[in-house]
Image (cartoon, helix red, strand yellow):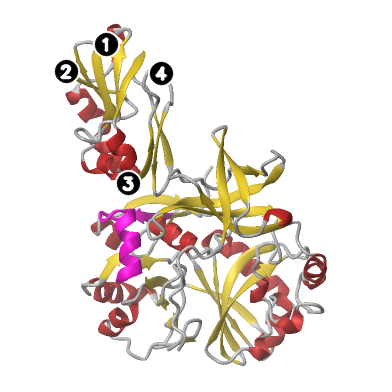
Amino acid sequence: MLDETQSIKILPLEALHITAGAKFGAFAGWNMPLSYPLGVMKEHLHTRSQAGLFDISHMQLVAVEGAEARAFLAHALPLDPDLMADGQSKYTFLLNENAGIEDDLIATRLSSTRFMIVANASRAVEDVAELQNRAFGFDVTVTALPRVTLALQGPKAEQALAAAGITNCPKSFMTASEPRPNWFLTRSGYTGEDGFEIAIPLEEAEAFAAKLTSQPEVEWIGLAARDSLRLEAGLCLHGNDIDADTDPVSAGLIWAVPKSILHDGLFVGAKAFAKLFADGPTHKRVGLKADGRQPVRGGVSLTDEQGKPAGRVTSGGFGPSAEGPVAMGYVRTDLAAIGTRVLADLRGKPTPMIVSPLPFVPHSYRKG
Amino acid sequence: MIYFTEDHEWIRVEGTIATVGITDYAQSQLGDLVFVQLPDVGASVAKGDASVVVESVKAASDVYVPVNGIVTATNEAVVANPELVNSAPEGDGWLWQMSLADTGQLDGLMDAAAYAKHIA
């Protein structure tokens, strides 16, 4: 029997997407626009050359507020909130005691007592519960905020945002502001392009989305192109490339953990993390390029040239800007050097893949 | 005569030679194609074989052989330019030609009117 938590969730702006001709599909319990009449390929390329608009309201904005917000976050996440400037955003994780990645997050410091966290749709309920759990004893509240969240990505994102009425945007990538009461605007994204994520109160969202889509450089972009964009940018999808059984060390995401807490942090998972960091990983996340034209997708297993298990592909597909198949996955540390050849088992046919640098398409982040 | 399968292939029969492709509906569901793998000319194929793979940006899909026979030609133009299947699925975007081993197998397939109902 279906209860409310099992029924599919509907985006607040779903009617707009239906009008725009979206094809829908289920993702992380939500009925999501997968593509629009433009088609995945053109949606992808439009985002790289103009401005793509994504409805990412399936993601969860969480407010962390209170006198002990910094102490709480230093315990709950591998962060050093004292080192963050007001308005600064950081990529981080919710780790378990084994340093496994329960979710990857963006945390923003708005003031010494106020932070915002953006959580993935598939983990939102668990994340909020776990953060509240970790908040026990701290003078802090953890509150899930109902918002419509839009991502506006691409070289013309700033121009389109200004035309829609927001001219005082954050000036460099991974900084944030609150341009209007209960709005939250970060210069960030999941495409490798410059761009913004804008959380908007429900009652103001439709009018603002209409302002954005009336700009000639803005097109709606679906989840399928979001996936090919982030894959080309070498960005992880939680549930595919990282999960509770992988850790920041093997995932090559140590850069997200401040140096001051690499060895003797006090965050949940710090002991396991320090050991992994000291010992080094058995497998590493790498970029993988297939020799031919056939995409190699997530789930395919890899062997070395002697036929011994080498790892697995965790995400893969066709990169419209890379103009060929692109993939990422985990390989044994001894096979992780750029240029190493591994073999993908493609429907029983061994297909050569070359360990390649990430990202496949250079990032175009604004440095301020 | 053109026949259609439940799996969204079309098959155009001229004498004992059939040309096979995917329908416009199928290409619209798959989205932009980026890779097409065709069988070898001379290969013996049987109804239901998944001997052809088409891949879009989103996913890989099998194309099923609609009737028994032997592959007589493949469309190399779609291998070089998979987008042709999107732009002309029922024309220049054909996939392969085959001789028919058993024309009786055509009886179970749909005509255009029945296929239109099938995808409605």
Please state the horizontal and vertical placement of residue A259, each as a whole percent of the image.
Answer: 72, 82
Please state the horizontal and vertical placement of residue A367, each as a whole percent of the image.
Answer: 47, 85
Magenta residues span A31-51
> Which numbered disc covers residue A178?
none
Q: Earlier in the sequence, mark 3 or mark 1?
A: 3
* Residue type beneath disc 3: Gly
* Residue type beneath disc 1: Asp
Q: CA distance from mark 4 to mark 2?
A: 24 Å
- Write down the quadrant of residue B50 in the picture: top left
Viewer-closest of B101 and A34 = B101
Which residue has dot 2 on it? B1
Please state the horizontal and vertical placement of residue A190, each as a whole percent of the image.
Answer: 47, 68
Subunit that carries the residue with mark 3 = B
Which residue has dot 1 on it? B107
Residue A62 falls within the magenta-colored stretch: no
The answer to whether residue B35 is seen in the rendering is yes
The answer to whether residue A52 is seen in the rendering is no
Which residue has dot 3 on it? B31
Which residue has dot 4 on it? B43
In the rendered structure, the answer to whether residue B63 lies left or right of residue A94 reads: left
* Vertical position of residue A305 compared to residue A52: above or below: above
Tell me, yes or no, whether dots 4 and 2 are on the same chain.
yes
